[in-house]
Image (tube, grey):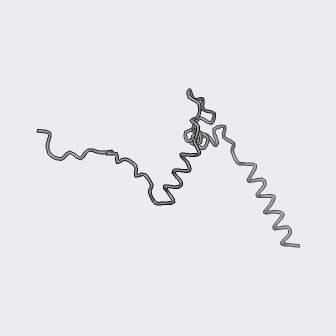
């Protein structure tokens, strides 16, 4: 019975302490700002319609993949290594 009173007292103190929590009007703004920064336009409007896909091209790509004859992508230089002084 003594333990029941302790549990009831602890629960009552927890409820009283929870009532003392201040509420802030800006609580959660950081999360909402971060979400807004990471979400791209959920309803984009494009000038051109979505390009159609062709099953034949897809089948050719799968066949190249299966036969290990995948087209290699073009090499693109992203940096220019220029050494020496500007003189």
Residue 23 in the image: above or below residue 62: above
> Which one is nearer the viewer's eye here, 6 or 41?
41
Residue at the image position 76 percent from the left and 49 percent from the top: 19
Q: Quadrant of the C terminus?
A: top left
Residue positioned most to the top: 47
Residue positioned most to the left: 87
> Which one is nearer the viewer's eye here, 38 or 1?
38
Residue 69 in the image: above or below residue 35: below
Residue at the image position 57 percent from the left and 38 percent from the top: 40
Residue 2 in the image: above or below residue 44: below
Does residue 3 appear left or right of residue 55 in this picture?
Answer: right
Residue 49, position in %: x, y?
Answer: 59, 30
Report how many numbered discs are placed on residues in the image: 0
Residue 29, position in %: x, y?
Answer: 61, 40
Residue 7 in the image: above or below residue 17: below
> Which one is nearer the viewer's eye here, 1 or 38?
38
Residue positioned most to the right: 1
> Which one is nearer the viewer's eye here, 70 or 40?
70
Residue 66, position in %: x, y?
Answer: 51, 60
Residue at the image position 74 percent from the left and 52 percent from the top: 18
Residue at the image position 54 percent from the left and 54 percent from the top: 62
Q: Quadrant of the N terminus?
A: bottom right
Residue 7, position in %: x, y?
Answer: 82, 66
């Amino acid at each position: 019975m003594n333990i029941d009173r302790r549990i009831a007292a602890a629960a009552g103190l927890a409820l009283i302490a929870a009532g003392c929590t201040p509420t802030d009007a800006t609580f959660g703004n950081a999360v909402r700002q971060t979400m807004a920064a990471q979400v791209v336009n959920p309803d984009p409007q494009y000038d051109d319609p979505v390009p159609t896909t062709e099953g034949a091209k897809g089948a050719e790509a799968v066949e190249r993949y299966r036969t290990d004859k995948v087209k290699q992508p073009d090499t693109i230089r992203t940096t220019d290594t220029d050494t020496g002084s500007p003189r």
